[in-house]
Image (cartoon, helix red, strand yellow):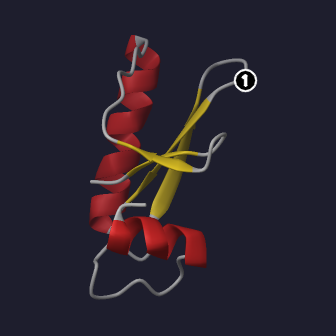
């Protein structure tokens, strides 16, 4: 598991997510979709007014095709 704070461009060790039922349901559906089609390696979950967003990614450390350099560094080095 890797967690990136895009604002500071730093790896985080832990986060707490507070989700509404609808947001949790959307996250669940997005994860199920990613597990069925891992080539679509990410999904975006937004709050209802589109002011906040979670991006979830599925990765295989042995196949990082499609990830940018920043993402690869985070995945490989957790930095």
- Tag count in the figure? 1
Whether residue 31 sits left or right of residue 26 in the image: it is left
Which residue shows up at 72% across the image and 23% down it?
Answer: 51
On screen, residue 36 above or below 17: below
Residue 39, image x and y in percent?
Answer: 42, 77
Tag 1's secondary structure? Answer: loop
Please tell me in which quadrant of the rendered image residue 49 appears. top right
Residue 69 can be seen, yes or no: yes
On screen, residue 46 above or below 18: below
| Residue behind mark 1 | 51
Please tell me in which quadrant of the rendered image residue 5 appears. top right
Residue 70, image x and y in percent?
Answer: 57, 69
Quadrant into which the C terminus falls: bottom left
Whether residue 66 sits left or right of residue 39 in the image: it is right
Q: Label 1 neighbourhood size at 10 Å, few (<14), some (14-19), many (20+)? A: few
On screen, residue 38 above or below 20: below
Residue 40, image x and y in percent?
Answer: 47, 70
Which residue shows up at 41% across the image and 16% down it?
Answer: 19
Q: Nearer the viewer, residue 29 or 49?
A: 49
Q: Nearer the viewer, residue 28 or 54?
A: 54
Which residue shows up at 39% across the image and 22% down it?
Answer: 17
Quadrant into which the N terminus falls: bottom left
On screen, residue 44 above or below 69: above
Q: Nearer the viewer, residue 74 or 33?
A: 74
Which residue shows up at 37% across the image and 24% down it?
Answer: 24
Please tell me in which quadrant of the rendered image residue 41 appears. bottom left
Residue 40 can be seen, yes or no: no
Residue 27, image x and y in percent?
Answer: 39, 36
């Amino acid at each position: 598991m890797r967690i990136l704070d895009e604002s500071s461009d730093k790896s985080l060790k832990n986060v707490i997510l507070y989700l509404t039922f609808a947001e949790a349901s959307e996250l669940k559906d997005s994860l199920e979709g990613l597990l069925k089609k891992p080539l679509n390696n990410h999904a975006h979950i937004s709050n209802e007014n589109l002011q906040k967003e979670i991006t979830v990614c599925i990765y295989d450390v042995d196949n990082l095709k499609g990830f940018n350099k920043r993402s690869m560094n985070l995945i490989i080095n957790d930095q």
